[in-house]
Amino acid sequence: MTLNTPSLVKADHFINGRWTPSRAGKTFEARSPFNRTLLGHVAEGDREDARDAIKAAASGFVALAKLSPWDRARLCNRVAESIEKRRDELATILALEQGKPLATEAYAEVDAAATGFREAGELIKWLEGEYIPVETPGKRAISFRQARGVYAVVTPWNFPINIPVEYLAPCLAAGNAVVWVPAPTTSLCAAKLVECLVDAGVPDGAVNVVFGPGAVVGDEVVSNPGTHGIGFTGSPGTGNIIATRGAGKPMLLELGGNGPVVVLDDADLDRAAEAAAFGSFFNAGQVCAATGRILVTGKNHDALARRIADIASAIRLGDPLALETTMGPLNNAQVFAKVEEHVADGLARGGELIAGGRPGVSGSGLSYQPTVMGRVARDALLNRSETFGPVAPLVVCADAADLLETANASSHGLAASVFTRDLSQAFAFSEKLRAGLVNVNSASCYWELHLPFGGASGKASGLGRLGGKHTLREITDVKTITFDIT
Ligand code: NAD
């Protein structure tokens, strides 16, 4: 059963509270990654459009400053209500344009977005300051957190509703205006989210959206002196460019991962297989905290691989709008090509193909079968770098020490899992794994919106921590005020 495709839409930039075409009049097409159907036309911005949005955001910041934290909390709640009212529209465009299955994943992402706005509205009320004792008689000192001004927010296409909300909601709650550059392949999702902000009565200029190539409009918003902080989620390569172009501005960089799932010899294999399969195949593997590789000793390799392959065989790859589908296509040709390259490289280096390993579903160039590969070489791309696709690669390690060393021998360090029944081993691995998040006995991608999330220092997975009060701290300045009362 499929839902009807909504009629073609046209998405303009959203600048200073108005839908605005590009100055140059250019547009680009939005197409379904499943069957290439034309979904709509999107305004293609250039640096001038981005500068217009930055100028508008300066006045949006002034408007937000006139609201109390309680007013901004109410605004966030109204956005959440609008997201809930438009739940079907948002989930449908998400399935159509991003490619994730409507029934099993798209609605959950929309629900998380509503929660994100509600939580930001709740937490801002308790962002308290300090009364600081001082040495000098007759002096008093306080400090508190203050909005920074205009935030440049640049986001990817894998969770095109919820990742933007991780920045937009705390920025609005804290009083930062935003210029948002969404990933081009999920521009219609962004436009639909903006409709919720409009419903909620967001002040003109408080949130502005400019569509177009990241290297142009994204670069302008991060490098322009009119923005005062940066929120970026995307690849390490782009993160490095942004760190240079936005040098000197406070920045949250949420980058890539290659999540190891470490399965110790005493692990519950059914549980480990279920979590590893979920971590590898959820959102067709296009998750920064995905299970990138499964590390196991020779004792359990075959049994674990068989269990994961059984789970993979039950996945229904197909049209994201069909209610029986549990895995949709990959979002774009680049990610598809990378998955093909990594699988071919794994096979060439002696990996054993246990399931999948090929494009799937006729009629779509971008669907890829859930794939399980055993005995993957350590120097294979699947083990060494982020695949970002539906592949569960198992790597055989000698013993517990080798499991830990192999897990940490990666340039990424975002999320990891360890499976064991032994509490001391659980703690030992959790503490020694070089990752910002370690999930014991659950999937590498388990996370809740208020939990701190980000990369380990010195790895290519980013800077700072997203999540609840942690984001509010990251996007505000500490202001210190002293009083002379003599
Ligand atoms: P990407 O870096 O190619 O693009 C991300 C965004 O940056 C897009 O909007 C793009 O248009 C923009 N961009 C591209 N070049 C730019 C430039 N020079 N200046 C400014 N902006 C620019 O990443 P992607 O392929 O869209 O997303 C996948 C990556 O994102 C993966 O590596 C994944 O792990 C990572 N990711 C990380 C997290 C996290 O929370 N750590 C979450 C989701 C995705």
Image (tube, rainbow, N blue to C red):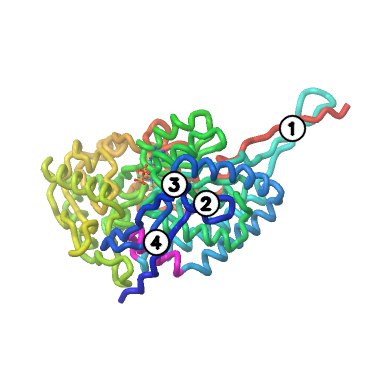
Given the image, on which type of amino acid does mark 4 rest?
Leu
The disc at residue 450 is: 2
Q: Secondary structure at mark 3?
A: loop
Q: Secondary structure at mark 2?
A: loop
Q: Which residues are magenta?
A: 88-101
Task: Tell me what residue is drawn at x 27 percent, y 45 percent.
Answer: 387
Where 247 falls versus 88 (above or below)? above
Q: Badge 1: few (under 14), some or many (20 or more) residues near its Cα, within 10 Å?
A: few
Q: Badge 4: few (under 14), some or many (20 or more) residues near its Cα, within 10 Å?
A: many
Assess whether residue 89 is covered by the magenta stretch: yes
Residue at the disc numbered 4: 94
Task: Tell me what residue is drawn at x 39 percent, y 55 percent.
Answer: 186
Q: Earlier in the sequence, mark 2 or mark 4?
A: 4
Task: Tell me what residue is drawn at x 74 percent, y 32 percent.
Answer: 481
Residue 358 image-quadrant placement: bottom left
- Distance between the alpha carbons at the discs numbered 2 and 4: 23 Å
Q: Position of residue 404 (x, y in %)?
A: 30, 38
Q: Position of residue 188 (x, y in %)?
A: 42, 58
> Comparing marks 4 and 3, which lies closer to the viewer?
3
Residue at the disc numbered 3: 24
Q: Badge 2: few (under 14), some or many (20 or more) residues near its Cα, within 10 Å?
A: some
Where 83 falls versus 450 (above or below)? below
Residue at the disc numbered 1: 481
Relative horizontal placement of residue 439, taking residue 180 as reference (left or right)? left
Given the image, on which type of amino acid does mark 3 rest?
Ala
Q: Badge 3: few (under 14), some or many (20 or more) residues near its Cα, within 10 Å?
A: few
Q: Secondary structure at mark 1?
A: strand
